[in-house]
Amino acid sequence: MSSVSRSLSKESPSLMGVVNLTTDSFSDGGNLLSGNLVNVSKTLRKVEKLISEGADILDFGAESTRPGFTAIPSQIQIDRLIPVLEEIKDEDIIISVDSRDYKVLHEASKFGMKFVNDVSKNISLKKLKLVKEKELFICTTHQGNLKQKTSNILEDVDNFFKSKEKLYLSKGLSTEKCFFDPGFGYGKTPLENILMMTNISFFKKGKRKILTGTSRKKSFAVFFKDTSKTKLSASLLSGIICALGGSDIIRSHEIRSLREELERLGIYER
C-alpha cells in the first residue's frame, strides 16, 4: 500500500470512517452483526460505501468503549474482525483497528492493519514494540477523570501528549506515524469538550498530529441543539470546527456529508 504515508501527510484532513462490529456502540451497535457474529457481506457493503464516499481510513472496532461498556474477550474481537480484514487486506485503503487488546492488534497486523487506534490511557510496551516492528501508525487518546478534575483541561491534555511523545521517541517510534486524540467524551465535562473542540490549534505543538472524534457524541448534540437520532448537524458542525483548528484526521460516521461540507468550505481535497 504505497499510498498510505502520502494520504496521511496531506495538508487537508484525512477522513476516518467508523465501522462498528459491536453489539453496544452508542449509535449503531449490532447493525453489522448476526447474533454475536459479524455479517461479513453486510460489513463489506458498508466498507464499499465508506470508500466511495471518500474515507481515507477505515476504523474497525469489535469492542465498544462508550461509558459503561462491557469488555469483550480477545478471541471474540478477533473472530469479528479477521473475516472482514481478510477480505479487504489488499484494498487501497488504510485499515485501522480500535482496540485496547494486544492480542487483537497483533492478529490484525497479519491482515492488513496499518493503524492502531488505542483508547487505553497507558499503552503497553508490547504494543509499542509491535508498532515499531510493523511500522504502524498509532493514535493515543487522553482519558479524563470526572472525579479528579484539573484546573485547565487544555494543559492537562497537552501535558499527557508531551509525556507520550517522550516515551515514543525513547522507544524509537517515528513522530510521523504518531497521532494524538484529545478524547472527547472520555471523562470530560460538556464545557471541557467544547473548550477542546474550539482549541484544536492549541494541541498542534511542533509536528504533533491530532485525531478528533466528535461524531454523534452527546455533548455536541446538546451544545448545537441537535435532537435528531443521528446527530448529523452536531457531527458536521463539530467536525468542521475541528478541521478549521487543524485536525489531521477526523473520525466520523458521516463521511460523505462531512467531506462535502469541507469541500464546500475549501478546506478539504481528496
Image: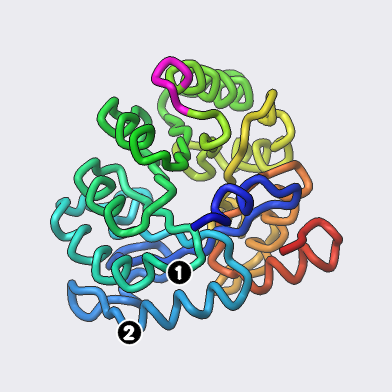
Position of the C terminus, as image quadrant, is bottom right
Where residue 212 appears, as percent x and y from the top left, is 59, 46
Callout 1 crowding tier (Cα within 10 Å): few <14, some 14–19, many ≥20: few
Q: Amino acid at mark 1?
A: Glu
Residue at 33% in and 56% down = 64
Q: Is residue 69 above or below residue 204?
A: below
Residue extending furthest front?
A: 2
Tell me which segment is drawn in magenta. 169-173
Disc nearest the viewer among 1 and 2: 1
Q: Amino acid at mark 2?
A: Ser
14 part of magenta stretch = no
> How far is disc 1 from disc 2 in space, using C-alphas?
16 Å
Task: Judge by depth and name the residue closer to the eye, 2 or 113.
Answer: 2
- Can you see residue 69? yes
Res 171 → quadrant:
top left
**As drawn, is 168 to the left or to the right of 80?**
right
Q: How far from the left and from the top, in percent, is residue 94? A: 49, 58
Residue that appears at 72% across and 59% down: 237
Callout 2: SS: helix
Residue 109 disc label: none
Q: Is residue 256 left or right of residue 121?
A: right
Find residue 223 and report its horizontal and vertical position in percent.
Answer: 67, 53
Residue at the (35%, 83%) spot, across then down: 42
Q: Is residue 159 above or below residue 74?
A: above
- Residue 218 can be seen in this image: no
Residue 170 occupies quadrant: top left
Residue with the mark numbered 2: 41
**Residue in front for this viewpoint, 16 or 3:** 3
As drawn, the label of residue 91 is 1
Q: Secondary structure at mark 1?
A: loop
